[in-house]
Amino acid sequence: MNLPNILTIARVFLTCFFIIFAEQGRPGAWWALLFFVLAVVTDLADGYIARKYDLITPFGKFMDPVADKFLILSAFFMLAFQGFVPLWMVLVIAAREILVTASRVQCMTRGEVIPAEQTGKIKTAVQMTTIIVALLYHALGISPENLLGFYWQGTVILLIIFSVILTVWSGIEYFRNLPKEGEA
């Protein structure tokens, strides 16, 4: 078990702590934000370390994206259930993530590894930024009735719309560029 794989496993546990504190609503908001940011840092660190020191493993190739999806979908669903983002948008994001992950797993069973494309990486960065801004808005407890709250809420809405657009676009791009069975 190398350091990038340990960081990937740590991200799963950090996501569990994120969920525990996010479920507490406003009292746990700062802790939820902290655990989410720590999980994002592990995502950045494990990829960097794995590439820099050539520590890429089959476990990491499989588990890293699964841990990412667990983190992102948990956060989006928590935000939807707390009324910060529309549930239908989260369902669109979840559908894309599940379909792409299932496709990657199917390709892996055939010995094919489909690397993440640039659009998918940008999508993930925008999703994580959206979640951090929404969690910060929640933690600060800014009322949407005042001007500052109106702008924060508007920013979260614009970010979630951008996240959905990038999510759908990257999903279409993924399936359009997917090699057919036996083609890779």
Image (cartoon, rainbow, N blue to C red):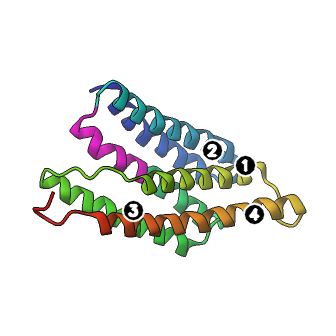
**Mark closer to the chain start, 3 or 4:** 3
Contact flag, marks 3 and 1 (Cβ < 8 Å): no
Circle 2 is placed at which residue position? 33
> CA separation, marks 3 and 2?
22 Å
Give left or right: position of 59 versus 24. Answer: left
Task: State which region is magenta.
Answer: 56-69
> CA separation, marks 1 and 4?
13 Å
Residue visible at 50% across and 39% down in the picture = 39
Task: Give neighbour class at mark 4: few <14, some 14-19, many 20+ (Cα, 10 Å).
Answer: many
Residue 143 at least partly seen: no
**Mark closer to the chain start, 1 or 4:** 1
Circle 4 is placed at which residue position? 153
SS at badge 3: helix
Task: Give neighbour class at mark 2: few <14, some 14-19, many 20+ (Cα, 10 Å).
Answer: many
Query: x and y percent of residue 83 in the render?
Result: 65, 67
Please state which amino acid type lies under the numbered disc 4: Gln
Disc nearest the viewer among 1 and 4: 4
Please state which amino acid type lies under the numbered disc 1: Ala
| Disc sitting over residue 97 in the figure | 3
Residue visible at 48% across and 45% down in the picture = 15
Please state which amino acid type lies under the numbered disc 3: Glu
Query: x and y percent of residue 61 in the render?
Result: 28, 43
Disc nearest the viewer among 3 and 1: 3
> CA separation, marks 4 and 2?
17 Å
Extreme residue toward the right, this view:
146
SS at badge 4: helix
The image quadrant where one finds the C terminus is: bottom left
Circle 1 is placed at which residue position? 139
